[in-house]
Image: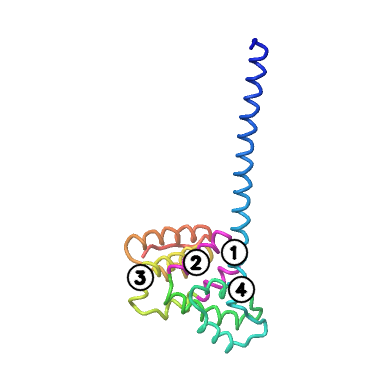
Amino acid sequence: MNRRQSIIVTIFSIAIVIAVIAARIGRREDAAAEKKKVAEVSTERVGKTMENAVAVDATMTLEQWQQKISETGISEFRALLDAAMRITDPGIRNTVVIGIVDRWLREDPSNFTKYVAVLEVNADDAKVSVLVLALQDSLTKLSPEQAASDEILVVVQRLIAHFAVHNPDLALAWAKKWLLDDTMENALASVARGYAKTDGHFQKP
């Protein structure tokens, strides 16, 4: 085999290797795309299942909502609360949301804090405002043991952080009532910043 033939064979071999590699990459990409499609379908199915599990009617009365709250599994409360947020009557909506938050805080405060975190990340101020109103009521109904849990402390700190921006006086009142030591110090720093933004006067307790 002369030099020219050797070069041709080498080029041909390289071409085959490249073709094999490209085919493998293509198969991997197809597999990844298929996995993504399956995941999306699964997520959609889960979402639909949750929606069906907490299916509500826009004409539901307060009594029907209260029954729904008592019958719905705690794992479905995120979808239930989202549905309650869409109630157009402010009075019924607030009462229903309080009912949901009452039970959620008692039975699964950890996942409740995760729900609040999602709202904050999404900057969903309308839902956060409704939830803040409910929390002011629901937190007062907890037993001393429940109120002393780490999960509830996280909820209270988030509530105070919200008030520090929108209502420093209320934030200060809640901090004095619920917090101690380092958590109190951190909260007061937020409250002081809130007063500074509103040109108010802050006096550390």
Mark drawn on residue 25: none
Q: Residue furthest front?
A: 1
SS category of the residue bearing label 4:
helix
Q: Earlier in the sequence, mark 3 or mark 1?
A: 1
Mark drawn on residue 124: 1
Mark 2: few, some, or many residues within 10 Å (few <14, many ≥20)? many
Q: Residue at x 62, y 44 (%)?
A: 27
> Residue tagged by mark 3?
149
Mark 3 and mark 4: Cα distance apart in space: 31 Å
Mark 3 and mark 1: Cα distance apart in space: 27 Å
SS category of the residue bearing label 1:
loop
Query: What's drawn in magenta, residue-wise?
Result: 110-134
Mark 4 and mark 2: Cα distance apart in space: 32 Å
Which of the two discs, 4 and 1, sits closer to the camera?
Answer: 4
Q: Residue at x 64, y 41 (%)?
A: 26
Q: Earlier in the sequence, mark 4 or mark 1?
A: 4
> Residue tagged by mark 4?
51
Q: Is residue 91 magenta?
A: no
SS category of the residue bearing label 2:
helix
Q: Earlier in the sequence, mark 3 or mark 2?
A: 3
Q: Are marks 4 and 1 in contact (CB under 8 Å)?
A: no
The type of residue carrying mark 2 is: Phe
| Placement of the N terminus among the 4 image quadrants | top right
The type of residue carrying mark 1 is: Asp
Q: Earlier in the sequence, mark 3 or mark 4?
A: 4
| Placement of the C terminus among the 4 image quadrants | bottom left
Q: Are marks 3 and 1 in contact (CB under 8 Å)?
A: no
**Residue 94 spot, x, y in % from top left:** 57, 79
Mark drawn on residue 163: 2
